[in-house]
Amino acid sequence: MGCNSVSSLLAFLELVVSLAALIVKKLTDSQGEQVNKRNQKLSAEWSLLNNLNWSQAGNDFSILTYGGYTFISGAFLLSRVITDKFERCEQILLYCGVIFFFTEACLVFGTLEYIPVDIEKNALVLGTLSAIGAILFFIDICYKSSSNHNVSKEVQTELGHTISQDFSDTPPKRYPHSKSVQMCPSVNGLYVPIEKYSKTNVLQTDV
């Protein structure tokens, strides 16, 4: 399985987990409202919380996390099917996904003592899905980082091999051997080459 296939599989799993968490969240909220209305009609005791939200702000954060990352994971999957580039923006979103889903898991598990028994199973499912989502995003970050590191090492190795091959293919420069010239002192104290000195002596002898 290639690098692109593994990245696409991770993005697909992230999409499935985010969508499943969003669906479970909506179903749990609806079931929690029904349980609360039933308890009020029967004048029965009810828990401190009737759903998995500590407040309206917590509800908005949950919807933003699950719904937003359903869309983001779909964009991840589409981009990785087309290309296998790992952009800086994607890395930031993955880090945020780890933080948001881990926070959601903690918040959901924290409501187990305060919610009706009827929706405890839903809370366990939603908390588990949130934890799995955080783990998937973290695995995605580690996998992409290791892939980028391996690609960088391969590029450096290939570049070094190319440079060494270029040096080995380049023929060494050959410089012509300099002709050694022996000098001989002349009459006026200057040094002249031996060949020229010999010619001068021959001319003087002829004269």
Image (spheres, rainbow, N blue to C red):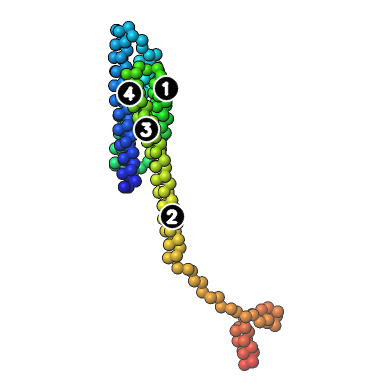
Quadrant occupied by the C terminus = bottom right
Q: Earlier in the sequence, mark 1 or mark 2?
A: 1
Mark 2 and mark 4: Cα distance apart in space? 52 Å
Q: Amino acid at mark 3?
A: Ile
Mark 3 and mark 4: Cα distance apart in space? 15 Å
Residue 77 lies left or right of residue 165; in this view the side is left
Residue 206 lies left or right of residue 59; in this view the side is right
Occupied quadrant, residue 179? bottom right
Residue carrying label 1 = 110
Residue carrying label 2 = 157
Residue 44 x %, y %: 33, 9
Mark 1 or 2: in front is 1
Does the CB distance between marks 1 and 2 fall below 8 Å? Answer: no
Q: Earlier in the sequence, mark 2 or mark 4?
A: 4
Question: How dense is the environment of label 3, judged by Cα within 10 Å: few (below 14), some, or many (20 and up)?
Answer: many
Does the CB distance between marks 3 and 4 fall below 8 Å? Answer: no
Occupied quadrant, residue 15? top left
Question: How dense is the environment of label 1, judged by Cα within 10 Å: few (below 14), some, or many (20 and up)?
Answer: some
Secondary structure beneath label 1? helix
Secondary structure beneath label 4? helix
Q: Amino acid at mark 2?
A: Thr
Secondary structure beneath label 3? helix
Is residue 64 visible from the viewing direction of this image?
no
Q: Amino acid at mark 1?
A: Gly
Residue carrying label 4 = 122
Residue carrying label 3 = 132
